[in-house]
């Protein structure tokens, strides 16, 4: 991928991040609209057994552990690169891209757990609505940082080649 196309992606992700930040600032206004429109609800599967609840928790725990391990690998590679005098390690941005999915997985887990296991009350949906903007903003921000790190790595490599 060329540096020019990465700059285009950076612009789009930065715009998306700003939009999501703006929407997260508007969350208190959205919260005033939601509770009267959402009646209390029952879970979709009232007879969901304890084994399935445990399986949902286990899958979530494994996914989040795996994605947090991606962040750990990124920082280990970053610190090893700093010890060698190189901040922008080639191929290191992919670990940030993978770790950026952590807030999305958390959001999906909350949605599944509320709708399928506990039921969707108005208050629970209000909290989910509020947290969804923050999780999407976090995902977008981490992706933006990964893109910037990727562009900086390319620029760093080009500077080393020209010197």
Image (spheres, rainbow, N blue to C red):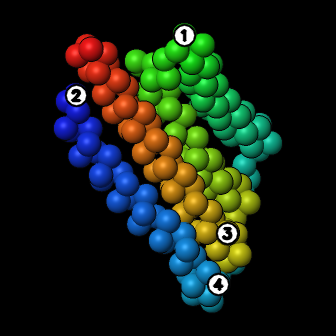
Q: CA distance from mark 2 to mark 4?
A: 46 Å
Whichever of callouts 4 and 3 sits on the residue coming sooner in the sequence is 4
Q: Does the residue at mark 4 contact the one at mark 3 (Cβ under 8 Å)?
A: no
For discs 3 and 1, the disc positioned in front in the rendered view = 1
**Residue 122, x across and y down, in percent:** 67, 77
Indicate which disc residue 35 carries: 4
Mark 4, Cα crowd under 10 Å, few <14 / some 14-19 / many 20+, is some
Can you identify the residue that label 3 sits on?
127
The residue depicted at 23 percent of the width and 33 percent of the height is 3
Mark 2, Cα crowd under 10 Å, few <14 / some 14-19 / many 20+, is few
Can you identify the residue that label 2 sits on?
1
Image vertical order of residue 8 relative to residue 79, above or below: below
The residue depicted at 62 percent of the width and 87 percent of the height is 32
Question: Which residue is the extreme one toward the front?
Answer: 163
For discs 2 and 3, the disc positioned in front in the rendered view = 2
Mark 3, Cα crowd under 10 Å, few <14 / some 14-19 / many 20+, is few
The residue depicted at 22 percent of the width and 28 percent of the height is 1
Can you identify the residue that label 1 sits on?
84
13 on left or right of 108: left
**Residue 143, x across and y down, in percent:** 44, 42
Image vertical order of residue 19 relative to residue 76, above or below: below
């Amino acid at each position: 991928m060329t540096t020019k196309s990465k700059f285009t992606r950076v612009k789009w992700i930065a715009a998306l991040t700003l939009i999501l930040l703006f929407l997260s600032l508007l969350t208190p206004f959205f919260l005033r609209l939601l509770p009267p429109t959402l009646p209390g609800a029952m879970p979709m599967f009232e007879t969901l057994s304890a084994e399935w609840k445990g399986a949902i928790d286990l899958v979530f725990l494994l996914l989040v552990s795996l994605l947090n391990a991606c962040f750990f690998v990124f920082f280990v590679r970053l610190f090893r690169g700093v010890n060698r005098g190189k901040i922008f390690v080639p191929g290191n941005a992919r670990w940030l891209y993978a770790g950026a999915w952590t807030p999305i997985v958390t959001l999906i887990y909350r949605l599944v757990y509320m709708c399928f296991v506990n039921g969707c009350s108005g208050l629970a949906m209000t909290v989910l609505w509020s947290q969804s903007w923050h999780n999407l903003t976090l995902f977008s921000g981490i992706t933006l940082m990964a893109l910037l790190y990727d562009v900086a790595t390319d620029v760093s490599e080009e500077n080393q080649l020209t010197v």
